[in-house]
Amino acid sequence: MSEHVIAESYGDFDEFTQDNNDVMLKNIAEDLRKCLPLETMLSSEHLALQKIQQRPEPTIQVDAFLYDEDFIDSLCEEGKMSRNYCMVCGSHQTAPLGFVSHSFSLMELKFIYHHVLPDLSGKVLVDVGSRLGTVLYGGYLYSSALQLYGVELNGDFCQLQEMIIKKYQFTDRIKVLHADICTQGSLLQNADVVIMNNVFEYFLDEAEQARAWEYISHNVRKQGSLLVTVPSLEESLSGLQVNIQLSPWVEQIPLNYDIYPEKDIDREAVEQIHLYRIL
């Protein structure tokens, strides 16, 4: 068999594997949708519900992993969801609703594992506030990470993650810890990659957020390790009383957000993803 044919068949195999992984993640999303209300918030998340209600514009929580744009469109057509709210009840004066997601979409996960992060062979990844486990499942399927740890404070979400991990036989590389991140010093100190997506803002009050960020900055210190955050560290820390100097701790690594054609990705969401190297 010629080298050209071999290369082509490997290419086909890679494409098949990728498509297969996408299908598996979509199946996981379907399993999770069956277990959760449309807004993907649990009654045990009092503070997050309260904070979403307090936003200046009416906002709904829509999980980007469970509900992509096409899915939202079909829900709107069925009258189960709306993209707009009425500014004066009963009138036609409507304005777009704000959408908040605490998970990465399928496309964002692929962007992170294929373009933001390097090869993770032999590496340990920690997802702070793993919630539905999307970063962990994406890491299992789209990377060669040795071990993927999710740290989640909410016991209900830990049970959901355990259900998926068992069903899809991810137990060899994924471990979920039901814990406060501020008890996980050694895990953070040994991590090669730490991912933090919208992690504290909706779930902790400002004093607790400050304490958690101080803890992260003291423990995520492994030289050369990587930190992926949404939004940027500057934005996350801006309103908090913290004594964290970024320049001696991290350097930001510029990302190429033009990898995907505009139509395939939510550019605004992807531009919220930031990568830092620990100094």
Image (cartoon, rainbow, N blue to C red):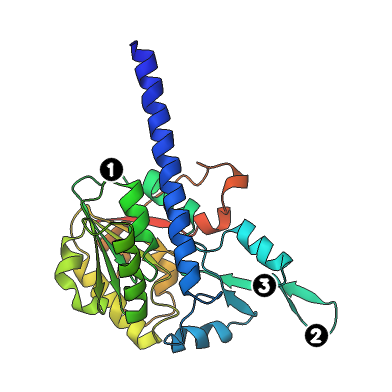
Q: Tell me if 239 is positioned left or right of 243 in this view.
A: right
Residue 76 percent location from the top left of the image:
70, 67
Q: CA distance from mark 1 to mark 3?
A: 39 Å
The residue lying at 33 percent from left, 13 percent from top is 3
Residue 56 percent location from the top left of the image:
62, 82
Among numbered discs 2 and 1, the one appearing first in the sequence:
2
- On the image, which quarter does residue 67 sit in? bottom right
Residue 134, compared with residue 37, is above or below; it is above
In the rendered image, the quadrant that contains the C terminus is: bottom left
Q: Tell me if 260 is positioned left or right of 56 in this view.
A: left
Q: Which residue is mark 1?
A: 119
Among numbered discs 3 and 2, the one appearing first in the sequence:
3
Q: Tell me if 7 is positioned left or right of 263 in this view.
A: left
Q: Which residue is mark 2?
A: 88
- On the image, which quarter does residue 151 sit in? bottom left
- Secondary structure, mark 1, is loop
